[in-house]
Structures are given as structure tokens and as C-alpha cells.
Image (cartoon, grey):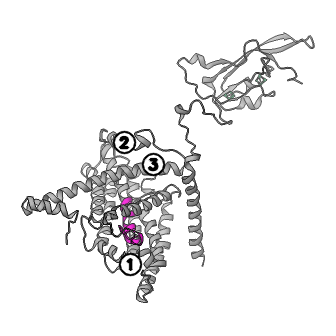
Amino acid sequence: MSYFSEIYKGIKTLLTGMSVTGKYFVTSRKGAITQQYPDNRDTLKMFDRFRGEVIMPHNEENEHRCTGCQKCEIACPNGTIEIIWDRGIDEATGKKKKKIDQFIYHLSMCTMCGLCIDVCPHDAIKWGQNFENSVYDRSTLTRVLNKPGSTLMQGVED
Amino acid sequence: MMQLRITENVHNWLFSVMPEGVASIVEMVLIAVVYLTIFAVAGLFLVLLERRVAAWFQLRIGPNRVGPQGLLQTMADAIKLLTKELTGTERADKFLYNLAPYFVIITALMALAVIPFSAEFHAFDINIGLFFLIAISSIGVIGILLGGWSSNNKYSLIGAMRSGVQTISYELSVGLSLLTMVVITGSLQLSEIIEIQKSGWLILQGHIPAVIAFMIFMISGTAETNRAPFDMVEAESELGAGFHTEYSGMKFAYFFLAEFINMFIISAIAATVFFGGWLSPFGITESIPELGVFWFLLKTMALVFLMMWFRWTFPRLRVDQLLTLEWKYLLPINLVNIVLMALLVWLNLTIRL
Ligand code: SF4
Ligand code: SF4
């Protein structure tokens, strides 16, 4: 008897599969996932989890969250990040304190592994969704992520 | 009996302006040209259709750049293939290697000749039509075997041998499921099979066993054309391109086109035998016989679409699963089904409108 129930089950599962693809076929005009890229360049928005490049967000007062702890530099498997740091006087306490001078990021070496972002204790760096990274001169792929004159946001270290 | 029946007018005109011998040769050449055109146009159209339909099944858009809605895409592909260099392997069996594509394409063309596009448009109405179709469709596999064998490439050889296994097995089911319907029609001539369906399509006349036979025919027909889920002959992920790995340019295009024409032929046979061929549903356009081609193509395209639906839904079978399906399921069911159909006809339980 299992012979016939197997046939029944087989046909049923095949029809289930066909109904799924059939629904896709009918709705494909609305739900097409294809991006006709250069045509829709203005409206194209990459999905949030896309790993385009590492960026360092700044707020309106030109402040970032990077303390210069260098954990990301150590975590990076291929030396993509270089942190050039300095010592400055902390205005609140009057003591000497580490701060970043330049956060250098070599996009051409980055494998988008995400270890730097995972390891950062202050969420100072994030994934950016830009994907148009082709350039004529590879030196432009070496970027300084902290903006000129930017300072550390208050209260990050507490 | 050979009957050349493409439009009575052309026939009469030809015979009135030339001597009989010349006229019949000219007529044959004309018919050959017409069928070659159908072959090329239908092949290119089906490739385009397949790509668009596949895209829609996978929530993509498909080719839409060359010409309006991508209509000229396959033309561009054909021109590309025409201009490509014909390469071959060093130690291939050159004669067989070059012969193989023609086997495949000629059998496809021969099968096309027997299919009734409409009452008038029917090149070769042979009295053993269905038998001829079954026989001719198994010759195509020789082309595949030759191509795989002569390319001197392990992937081609494995692909070709798989094709042999597959065709030997599924040929049985194709034949037996069509025989089931012959039990009702009592004739192998395709024009007569259609004539009988004027009192109801065979799938209706034969109800339960006819539906079973139709399902078996579609499954084994898909296997006959080496399309997914039975595409172990080509199995891109395992064998490169299977039996035609070593072919390039136009020779590859022959194999490729023949595959699509074979799909059309299988659908056309199913439309003719189960769904009344060029007959309109319930005879609604019986007074306008010119619409026959339209109805025939409509039914065939619906079945072609069904085969595309199979292809883009089901995963590929393993070889042992393929053989299990044929020998343990389709064949016994088919045999029981024939007996059932014979009983039905004997007890006069068929439905006639
Ligand atoms: S994503 Fe990986 S490779 Fe790129 S900078 Fe961060 S740790 Fe280095
Ligand atoms: S980005 Fe994060 S981990 Fe890297 S130095 Fe700045 S605070 Fe430390």
C-alpha cells in the first residue's frame, strides 16, 4: 500500500512546488529582484546589510566616536587599517589622553570581513552601502575616515 | 501513401504551369523550405520564450535589451554563433563528430513533417503517423551518442551514455502511453486521430485512463527531450555541457535548436493526441478552418509552457532515481492503464459528445 501512498505524496509535493513557482511567475512583474542598474542609478538603494566599504559616521558637530584604541587595527587580518594617533590634553580632566590624528583605511586591501566593525568597542565604524568604487588611480582608494578637525564625541568612553 | 496537402491552390497552380515531374519536385523543395523556415523561426522563438519564462519564474526580468522587449535577442545570439570559429578536439573521430549534429536536426525535422498544423497544413500524412513519430524520435538519440562518443572527452561520453540509458527507458513509456490512446482511436494516422476527436477530445473521451496516460506522456516526454528535471545528459554542474561540451559555433547551435524543436514536437504530439490538435474547443470556430493553425499553436504553446514550468521548478534527478521512476512507477502504471483503457472501450464506457 505504501507504493500508492508514495505516488500520492510524490505528486502532491510536485504540485506544491509548481504552485510556488507559479505564484512567482504571476507576480514577477511587480516583484522582480533584477536592478536595471545604470538606468535606475538615482533611485537605487542598496540593502542595509550590503558591505560596500567601512565608514566612520560623524554627527552635526563634526564629532566621531573613535577613541583611538587601535583594536580594529589589530583585528584586521590584512593590515587595511592604520591609526596614526597623538596625545592631547583632555579639557575636562586636564590629563594627557590618546586621540586619533588620522584613521587611514585602504579600501583596495579590504576583504569586507567585518572583523574591525565587530571588534570596535564604541561602534565608531560601520558598513557603508556605496558600491561604485572603481577609480582610475588606486591611490584614491586610500582614505582618511575621520573628517578634518573632527573631535571625539563626549561621553563615549564612560 | 504520401499526401502533400499544403494549400490546394499552390499545388494546382504549380501543376498547371509545369510538367508533372518538375512540378512535384518544385513542390517538395518549396515544402522543405517552408519547414526549414518554421524550424528556424520556431527554434529561435522558443529559446527566447524559455529565457523570458525562466526569468519570470525566478523573479527576474530576462533579456530585454536587444530590440523591443528583447525580441531580437535570439537573432543576435544566432548571428554570434554563426560567426564563431568551429573548434574540435585534437583526437576526435572527425567524421562522426561532424555527422552527429545533423542526425539530431534531421530527425527533428522529419518528426515535424508528420505533425498536422491544420487540416490543410500537413506535409506528410502517413498512415502509421504515430508509430513513425515514436520511431523517429528515438533516432535522435543516436546523434547524441555519436556526438558524445566521437568528441573524445570524458564528460561528453558520460553524458552520451546517460542519454542512452534515459532514452531506452523512457521510450517505453512514451510509446505505451500513446498506445493507450490508440486503443480508443483504432488508428495510427494523425489526421484520423483528429477526425475521431470531433466528438470530444480524447482526454475527455477516455477520462480517467486518458488523464493518467497524459501525465505519463508529459513526464516521459520531458525525459525524452533531455530537459530538466531529466537533464542528466547535459547536467551543467556535473558534466560541463554534457554531450555537446566540445561543440562550438553553429554545430552547437544545431544541438541547441534541436532540443527546443523536440520540446515543441513532444508538446505538439500531446496536443494532437490528447487535446484535439487543430480542432477548436467545442467546435466554436468550425466554420472557419483557417483558425486551425491558431488553435493548434495555442494548445501546443500551453503544453510547452507546462514543460518550462517543470524545468524551472524541479531539481535534477539522480540516475538511479531516474531509473526507479521509469521501471518501478511509470511502466507498471502504464501497463495497468492500457488494460483499463481496453476495458473501457470494450464496455463502451468512453464519453462521446
Ligand atoms: S573589514 Fe576586515 S579587512 Fe576590511 S578593514 Fe575591517 S577587518 Fe580589515
Ligand atoms: S574605530 Fe573603534 S576599534 Fe578602531 S580605534 Fe576607533 S574606537 Fe578603537
Numbered tag placed on residue B77 in the rendering: 2
Chain of the residue where label 3 is placed in the rendered structure: B
Position of B257 relative to B85 (above/below): below
Report which quarter residue B186 is drawn in.
bottom left
Q: Which residue is mark 3?
A: B51
Quadrant where the C terminus of chain A is found in the figure: top right
- Within 8 Å: ligand 1 and the Cβ of disc 2? no
Chain of the residue where label 1 is placed in the rendered structure: B
Q: Which amino acid lies under the numbered mark 3 shown in the image of this protein?
A: Arg
Is-magenta flag for residue B281? yes
- Circle 3/circle 1 CB separation < 8 Å: no
Chain of the residue where label 2 is placed in the rendered structure: B
Q: Which residues are magenta?
A: B263-283
Q: Which residue is mark 1?
A: B199
Residue B210's x, y, as percent? 45, 76
Residue A27's x, y, as percent? 57, 51
